[in-house]
């Protein structure tokens, strides 16, 4: 079987110039050769023909200083490949790649939806309409009814407030005060365009949700396994599977997976001194979703991950604690996918039970520091 090595960050940017780049150089004043063609189409063609491909981290195969040319790089890669010195990076199978495209695009649309919602908030505030200070969701059923009425020309705060539904009707006096503003044709144009864009984005997100459900159907069991982790929901589980796949044979241990995702502490020791151990730059899509799950887990009650978060937050801060809990979630995900099992909750008192003597001495010391004399009496079983 023919073997080829590919030295780049991922099969998304290659060393080939696109046709016509010489023309665009003059238009953009960029150096010749800076316009790169995507390498993925070539990867897919070679993959379909049965060629064994290796995606190699360029940092591992740097050529000697002063010999940096494309031809020199190619020759160096060939020599390393002949001697079996190249390690292939993780490239997901086609089904996972398709799922990854869908989940990443969905996330971008959700971010655009949030931006449009914030734009509507800003426009309403500019018109002195403080609907967001009364209604928890301006784009909810009541909020949209009021916005549509404003766009239709209604300006009476009492009429607008009567469009409230459900629990929001208990705040009618506050609504009448909040809806009294100076909403004019300029604000109506901005809100109409933003609201139409929001609804179009919601339709697109719904379409993507349906397509993700279809593509992930063969991996539904793995998604349900990950959904049992504290802080990880259905969408988060889909995103994690889209980034790491379900075949954990690719990563020999959970530590290998954490290192690949760049969520483990850095290892920088020289001369017996430990330098900065900050995490490397890794898969930003995976890192973001894991940190989001960590924040969700931190708000849960009586769970192991929440206890870990607040235990670390007191010492290293909340942001670093969220990264550490995200690392724990990734390690848990590896074990669930590798062992095909559900998540077993350890409980919020896990760290206390793990070292009961230390917890008891700490509590006694705190009471003694407050001026109390402590006598311990075991409770009856």
Image (cartoon, rainbow, N blue to C red):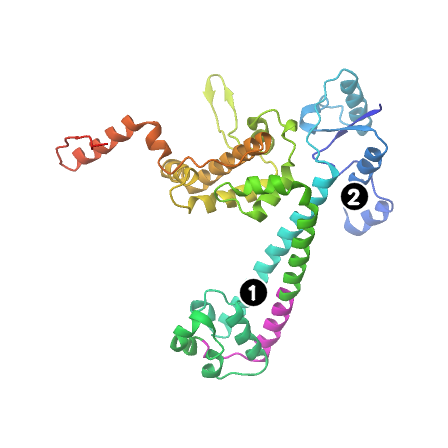
Q: Position of residue 172 (x, y in %)?
A: 41, 77
**Which numbered disc covers residue 35?**
2
Q: Please give the count of numbered marks on the rendered protein.
A: 2
Compared with 127, 2 (above or below) is: above
The local secondary structure at tag 2 comes to loop
Q: Which mark is residue 119?
A: 1
Q: Is residue 197 magenta?
A: yes
User: Residue at left 46%, top 78%?
Assistant: 161
Question: Would you say residue 284 is visible in this rendering?
Answer: no
Task: Using the image, determine if residue 154 lies above or below residue 308.
Answer: below
In screen coordinates, is 359 left or right of 116?
Answer: left
**Predominant secondary structure in magenta?**
helix
Q: Closer to us: mark 2 or mark 1?
A: 1
Q: Examine the rendered structure and indicate whether residue 147 appears above or below residue 221.
A: below
Residue 240: image location, x then y, percent: 60, 41
Residue at 54% from the left image edge and 43% from the top image edge? 227
Rendered location of residue 353, percent (x, y): 33, 30
Quadrant of the image occupied by residue 80: top right
Name the secondary structure under disc 1.
helix
Task: Name the residue nearer the viewer: 213 or 100.
Answer: 213
Query: Which numbered dot is residue 367?
Result: none
Question: Distance between the Cα atoms at labels 2 and 1?
Answer: 35 Å
In which quarter of the view is residue 79 placed?
top right
Using the rendered image of the protein, determine whether residue 282 is visible from the camera's viewpoint. Answer: yes
- Across and down, in percent, residue 278 comes to 50, 32
């Amino acid at each position: 079987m023919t073997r080829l090595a590919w030295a780049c960050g991922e099969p998304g940017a290659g060393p080939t110039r696109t046709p016509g780049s010489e023309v665009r150089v003059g238009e953009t004043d960029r150096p010749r050769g800076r316009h790169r063609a995507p390498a993925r189409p070539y990867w897919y063609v070679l993959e379909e023909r049965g060629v064994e491909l290796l995606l190699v981290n360029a940092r591992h195969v740097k050529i000697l200083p002063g010999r940096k040319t494309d031809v020199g790089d190619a020759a160096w890669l060939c020599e390393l490949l002949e001697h079996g010195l190249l390690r292939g990076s993780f490239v997901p199978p086609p089904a996972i790649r398709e799922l990854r495209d869908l989940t990443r695009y969905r996330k971008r649309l959700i971010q655009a939806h949030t931006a449009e919602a914030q734009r509507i908030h800003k426009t309403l505030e500019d018109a002195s309409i403080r609907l967001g200070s009364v209604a928890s969701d301006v784009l909810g059923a009541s909020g949209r009814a009021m916005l549509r009425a404003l766009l239709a020309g209604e300006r009476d705060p009492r009429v607008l407030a009567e469009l409230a539904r459900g629990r929001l009707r208990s705040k009618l006096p506050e609504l009448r005060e909040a809806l009294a503003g100076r909403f004019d044709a300029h604000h109506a144009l901005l809100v109409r365009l933003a609201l139409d864009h929001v609804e179009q984005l919601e339709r697109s997100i719904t379409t993507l949700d349906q397509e993700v459900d279809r593509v992930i159907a063969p991996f539904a069991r793995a998604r349900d396994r990950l959904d049992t982790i504290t802080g990880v929901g259905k969408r988060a589980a889909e995103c994690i599977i889209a980034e790491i796949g379900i075949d954990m044979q690719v990563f020999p241990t959970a530590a290998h997976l954490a290192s690949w995702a760049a969520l483990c502490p850095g290892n920088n020791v020289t001369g017996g001194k430990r330098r900065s151990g900050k995490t490397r730059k890794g898969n930003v899509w995976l890192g973001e979703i894991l940190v989001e799950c960590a924040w969700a887990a931190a708000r849960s009650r009586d769970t192991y991950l929440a206890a870990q978060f607040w235990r670390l937050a007191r010492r290293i801060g909340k942001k670093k604690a969220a990264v550490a809990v995200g690392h724990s979630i990734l390690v848990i995900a590896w074990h669930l996918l590798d062992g095909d099992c559900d998540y077993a909750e350890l409980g919020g008192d896990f760290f206390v039970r793990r070292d009961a003597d230390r917890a008891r001495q700490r509590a006694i010391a705190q009471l003694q520091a407050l001026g109390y004399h402590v006598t311990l009496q075991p409770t009856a079983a």
